[in-house]
Image (cartoon, rainbow, N blue to C red):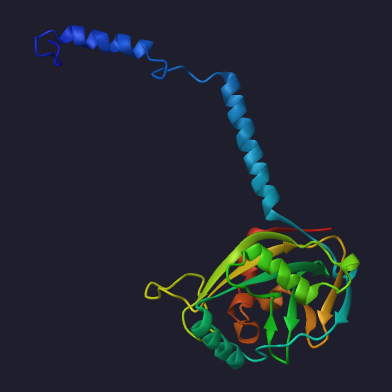
Amino acid sequence: QNGCRSAGGRGGRVEERGRDSRRRDPLATDRRPLESDIQIASTQQTQQTHRIIMSMNHTVYPVGNFKFGTKAAKEVKYPTVDAQMERLQTKYEAEGPRRSVDAVLVVHQNNHPHILLLQAGPSYFKLPGGRLRPGEEEVDGLKRKLVSKLSPESESLQVEWEIGDCVGSFYRPNFEQVVYPYLPAHITRPKETKKVYMVRLPESCYFAVPSNLKLLAVPLFELYDNAARYGPIIAGLPLMLSKFQFVRA
């Protein structure tokens, strides 16, 4: 006996009408995938995989390809960590949480990746970048900072900065040097949010550094687990960049 019956006891007819309806519904089809469908899906997956691989490749050029010079000195607003925290607190009280962006520029020397760092004073190192203006987009602000810190004053020698992937987000819960790669659960309003971006350098260009700063090429192995000298973000770069395949040109 059929277990599905209508109120009038004609369960068989109800079941038969359902089958007819499914055949007439163009959306209710059990068509098997054709070979062409499989080929299209395979091609799309291959293209997606290729895009992922290409995005993980990062071409680096020898440091000897680049020329370095100086330009007018820039005011160092916080030459020490204590001065930086004091200024951060003052700005926080006036403008709210600080948003900042930093750039990772990679060259190679002796077949090993080197990171370009700015040095202000004997023991203060930083990535090129800085504070965003209120309402400023991250990429636009980072380009502005790179022009200020690294581009020559002559427009004919300036490079068009190519901003790549964001490789790290960090949060400063208090007016202290400690930052975290996540927002602690008990913090609703961090004192600072910092984003770190890869920057793709051209094959060669001219860097002009403010005369009161130094531009250093520091090997990646020296940064690893060396927060005591370079701070937690710079010391964490070897881990952040581990997803990239550096291609030496």
Place of residue 17 in the rendered image (x, y in percent of width and height, measured from the top left): 25, 9
Does residue 238 appear left or right of residue 22 in this picture?
right
Q: How many marks?
A: 0
Q: Quadrant of residue 185?
A: bottom left
Q: Which residue is found at the position 9% from the left and 14% from the top?
A: 7
Residue 85: horizontal and vertical position, in percent?
56, 88
Q: In the rendering, at what x and y percent does residue 176 appear?
A: 51, 86
Residue 96 position (above or below residue 156) = below
Residue 125: percent from left, percent from top: 69, 83
Is 227 displayed left or right of 122 in the figure? left
- Quadrant of the snapshot with the C terminus: bottom right
Residue 211 versus residue 63 in the image, above or below: below
Residue 206 shows in the view? yes
Residue 65: name its quadrant.
Answer: bottom right
Q: Which residue is found at the position 58% from the left and 79% from the top?
A: 232
Query: Visible in this render: residue 241?
Result: no
Q: Which residue lies most toward the left here?
A: 8
Quarter of the figure with the N terminus: top left
Q: Is residue 150 left or right of residue 37?
A: right
What residue is shown at x 67% (from left), y 45% (from top)?
51
Choose between 207 and 99: the one closer to the eye: 99
Q: Which residue is at 40% across, 75% downward?
A: 187
